Every structure is written in C-alpha cells, then in structure tokens.
Amino acid sequence: MTRSYRILATLALACGLTACGGKKQAAAKSSAPPVVPQQLKENQLAGTPSTFLSNHAGSPVHWQTWRPSLLDDAKKSQRLIVALVGSARFPGSAETMKVINSSPALVERLNKNFIPVLVDGEISRDTMLMSAALASELGEPVAFPFLVVLSPDGAPVTWKVMSYLSDAAVIDRFEQALGVIERLWRESPDYVTNDSLAKLNHRRENPPEPEPEVKDPDQRLATLAESMRELCSLWDDTSDTFDNLGGLFPSEALSLLARASHAQALPEPLRAKCRKVADGLATSVLRSAMIDPLDGGVYPARIGISWNFPVPTRDSITQAEAIAGFIDLHHFLGYPGAVGLAERAAHFSEDNFLNDDGLFSVTRAMTAMQPTHALWTIGDLSLGLSSEEFAVWKVASEIKTLGNLPPEADPSRRTFRMNALHMALSPEEVAAKVGRPVDEVKQLLDSGRQKILRARETLHPEPEKDDTPSATASFMMISAYCHLYTATGDGEWKQKAVKLGQKCREAFGQARFLNERPGANPDPMSDSRAFTYAIAARASLDLGAVTLDDQWNRWASDLMTLLGENFANPEGDRLSESREGFAIIPYPFEDRAMIFGPSTHGIVRQNLQSLSKLDEPVPPGLIRWLTSLPDLGRSPIIYMDSVSALVSEFDAASLWVGAQVSPDAREAATRLPLRTFERKSGGSDPQAIKFIAPGGQESILPSAADVKALVGQ
C-alpha cells in the first residue's frame, strides 16, 4: 500500500547522507557554545493529553512533546532531534519503549547527544503519514515505532522502522539509525543542516501531482464499474482469500461490497458478483478469530496471512468501523447474525473504552502483549471445561491437539499446539455434529465461554482503562450508534448517539478549531488533523439522518467549511493533513489512501456526496474533491473509501420528510441505511415524504410501508 505514498524525493537510505560520507569540505562549526535549556534536561511528558506519552513520564529519557519552539531549542543546544512516532494502538510500541528505558547506554546517548521527542501518531496523524512516506523510500512497509532524525530546521536527516522483533534488535536498529549521523553531526553540522534542508526544499518544490479531475458522469460510472470488477477479481473462490487485502480487519471492504451489490447503476452480473464476494469474505472473516467469541470484541489486524491469528490488542476505532460493516451486511445482504455481532462489538467498546465523562478513548492503557496472548493449548481448555462443554467448543472452534493454525500462517511455529478460539460453526451446525439439541449446545457454549473468559482474565489481566478521551474514537462511535439504530430500531442506540454527539461538541469543539483531546486551546500536538474534521462531519451527518434534526447537518457543513479553509491549499487541489505550523516536518502530507484504515480524502468525498444529496452547499475549498479521483485503475483496494463515495454518487437517493408525517413513516425514514439514503426534514408538503431517486426522478411515498420497501428495490 505504501507505493502510493512515494511523495518524498529519494534520500540516501542508511543515514540519509551516505553520498557525502567522503566529503572533506565541511563547513565550520558554530563558534558559539551550545546552550541547553533546562527543560531539555528533564522528561516533559507528565500531564500530556495522551496516554501513550504520559505512560512514559517516568522514563529516564528526557522525552519532549512536540512544539514548534523545539527547533529553536535545537539550534541553541546544537543538537539533532530524534522523534519516535508510536501509539498504544500499534503492537510493538510498548515493547520498544521498555527496551529503551532499560538500556542505560541508550538513555544516556539520547539525553546527551540529541533532543528526544515522543510523538503519539494517533493524535498527530500527519506523523503516521510521514512515517509511511519515509518507510516507502527504504523499501519497507511502515510499522511502529518509527524513528526520524530532524535537523534544527525541521528537515528529515535519517529515519528507521523500529518495529519490535527482539530486545537486541531494538538496540541494533538505534545504532544503525544514529551511529553514522551522530559522527557526521560532530564533524560537519552545517553540512548536515544544509543538505537536509536542501532536500526538504526540493520536496516542497516537487510535490506529488494533484489527483486528476474526472467530470464526465459516464466516465465516472465506468470507473466505478471497473473498480468493482477489479476488486471482485481479487477474491479466490477456491481458497476463500482476498488477494492484496492487507492485514487490517476488512470493514471497508465488507461495507463497499455490500453496498455495491445493491447499486442499481451497476449491471446485474456485477452486482451479483459483489454479493458473492461479500458473502464469501464475510463468512471467512466473521467466523474467524478476528471476532472474539468470548467477549464479542473485534481484533484490529491479523498476524501473517490467517484471520485466525489476530493481533492481541484491541481498540474502539476498530469496533466502530466493524459495526458499520456488519450493519451494511445486514441491510444489503441480510447476512445472518450480523446485527448481533455489531451489538456485541458496541457493548465491548462501552465496557472497555467508555470513560466516566461519557466519551471514548482509543485503547486501554498501554502494555506489552505476546502474539500468542489469545491462543490456547488443548490441555488448557480441557482442564477448565466440563467434558460436555469442551466437546462443543472443540467442534465450534475446530480445536486440534497440534493446533488449528496452518503452518504457513506462522512459519516460526510460535503457535505450535496452540488454538485460536472462533465460531467456525454455528450452534446449529455444532448440534448436528455432536448429536445434541440446539438449545443444549447453546447453553454449553455459553457456560464454557464464561469459564474460558474468567481463565483468560486470570492469565492475562486486561490493562487499566484509559481515561483520556479521543475525538476521533468518540466521533466514530457516534456513527456506529447511528448504524445500530437503523438496523434495530432500538431508540436507545439513537439516544446514545445524540448524547455522545452533544458531549463531543462540548469537549472537542469549544473553540473555533477542533481539539483531538478535550479543551478549548489545542496545542501543536493535539490540534485536530484533517481526518478528525472529516470523521466529525460524517458523525454529524449520520446524526442528522437518524434524528432529522437539521442542526447536525449545519454543523457538518460548518466543519467541512473549516476543513476547506484551513487544510486545503490556495489552489484548492491539495489537502494537507495538518494546519500550517502544526506539523513536525514542514511539509503538507496528504492522506489519500487507506494505509491506516479510512483515509481523509475518502471520507471527505463521502461527506461531499452526502451534502450534495441533501442540497447543502459544498465548501468552496473542497469543490475539487467532488470531481477528482485517485488512480483507481492501478489499485482500487487502497482507495475503497473513495470508491464508496462513487457508489453514493450514483446510487444514493434523498428523502425530504415533512414535519407532519406520521410517526411510523418518520421512523421508517430514519431507519434507512446510512449513506445510501440521505434524508432531512423539509419539503413543500409538511404531510408528505418526497423521494428523489439517484437519477433525479421525484415521487411521493404515501406510507411507512413504501419507505421500508426502498431497501428491497
């Protein structure tokens, strides 16, 4: 996926300056002695609005938080900046930090020779995009933590993927990253500064081409059809695998395929293929260990090629994305059990990430976890369960003495004799195999589940809850609640969405600009990035759809206007992820592709389609994103969110709901699938619901039954 992010000019790989290793014409060092400000001599992470950072307030490393004035400190102290980008959400960050803290030599080196800066990529999304771009220049996939050394001008000098493999590997990678550049800085600091700044200026002068505009409707529809054909071609019926899908939980793929199967603008053979692939992918993933059968939580990614070997950490963002995918499977495919999975994921998110103030954190407190955290030996399971319980769980999860993961899923054989728990078979299928009544099997599965869950909590206690709310996580859970309401009609989900929406406006929108953490005055670290604005606008549009309260549509329009005014360039053809003056590297990184889940560009396109269908004005700074498209022909799988916007363009309808329509008809309108049916209060007849088809044809829907029938059309 990183190939679409080769947006920086080529630098020397090992240290960023290998081409000048033999240079003798070094500029003279500064004659002024270095002055090290007192705050650089102490750890500055206490009280930061990030659990990832505050967890390391006691580290012996003099970690700093990012601030623009740090560049002045670097000049005064005549030091390079070592920025380490990580997140509690990504495996390996906790392990790497532990190694750093336990290495006195490395601690002394960082404190004495550099300005060490710890960055939470979850808050500063632009730093994750920066990491992806720089990793692509190394020819490596991006992983975290990611280290980048900066000059006192903020220019990247050298960088290194620091993902955890072993304690020794962490130390070795620091040596690889710092050894040569440390010597060069001592011998020729002016050359290092000038060389890195020249290359940064070259990048600024040669940015990637803007995404081209495609204005012809026929060409856009043809692009949509070709993209869906390409996506469907990646599905292998024989092996039930989706080539090039990547390791993240495929929420966007499930949602897109389900929605495309309903899109009347696509030919029926293609819609049928989308249905088949969506059903195959759903069966492959939803019956895997990616869905925890013990507590209902969804794992964010897999290790290797098997969905039955999940990354053991979980987060609220994954739950919210998965809920949307599950609900679309329900609406458009009638996939059995999808709503139940969505409800369990929501309850899991509430149990683990909902704070006392009613907002959501991204993760629980940061802790190191082994990859085999969620796996079991057959002996462990049989000892904790009755023979009857073990018999049904053995069948349901396909448990085997040598383990149920194929060798190719784990070539290192860390998982030998270990089993992933998953509901590979339904209770009805298990009942048929073990020869017991279905109700009895369900009881045995549930009693066994409770025992296994208690055993796991004893063996692997959950980290403490994180009490630091996240704007991104909270806004995404609003949309998840809205999706759940459309599928269930349970007013409690809608009430939760509205309550959370109000809390988000109070906590994250007190000032003109959004803050990623609660407070009216965002600092450079927590100032919300473009992605958060897009997600917040999406949540507000969803609230407008399920409540028919136009205040939410207006707020969405305001957020998108702010996004266009403050993140788009004057020409209106680039969308920087951070506001000017808030980025670590002064370069306008763009979030065009789905490297870390949904992209800013994709969500912006979806939001603009919604605003257009609702007859709301499109912000002038974002008009181009109504017509521009990424290179879908090359790799539609990394642009699925932009493809989803195309589906909305050609398949989404609009409803104007009169203020005096019957309660049943009003409820039916609010429960239509999100993004496929946009709706708002209004219309010339207060007692009618006006329906505007994707092609513009208008009709009146006389009853709730007519509204409900839209989903089946």
Image: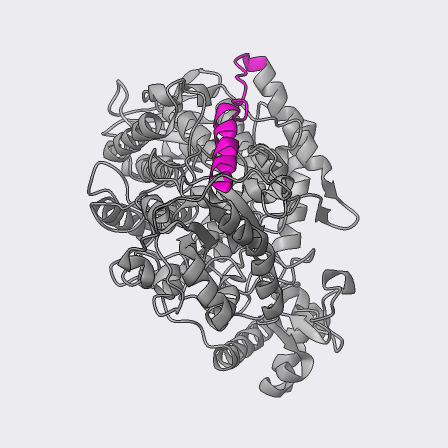
State the residue in front, 332 or 418: 418
Asked if residue 402 is among those painted magenta in the image, a careful observer would answer: no
| Residue 232 x %, y % | 69, 36
Give the residues drawn in magenta, as a range: 191-218
Q: From the viewer's perspective, is 439 left or right of 120?
A: right
Task: Name which residue lies at 69% across and 32% down.
Answer: 230
Query: Where's the N terminus, which quadrant?
Result: top right
Left-right relation of 620 to 320:
left
Q: Nearer the viewer, residue 315 or 293?
A: 315
Q: Main secondary structure of the magenta part?
A: helix
Give above or below for 534 relative to 205.
below
Which residue is at a point 47% across and 32% down the rendered structure image? 601
**Picture layout, residue 181 above or below residue 423:** above
Q: In the displayed structure, would residue 24 be above or below residue 575?
A: below
Q: Residue at x 63, y 63 (%)?
A: 426
x and y, in percent, of residue 561 in the image: 31, 27
- Look at the image and tell me whether residue 547 can be seen: yes
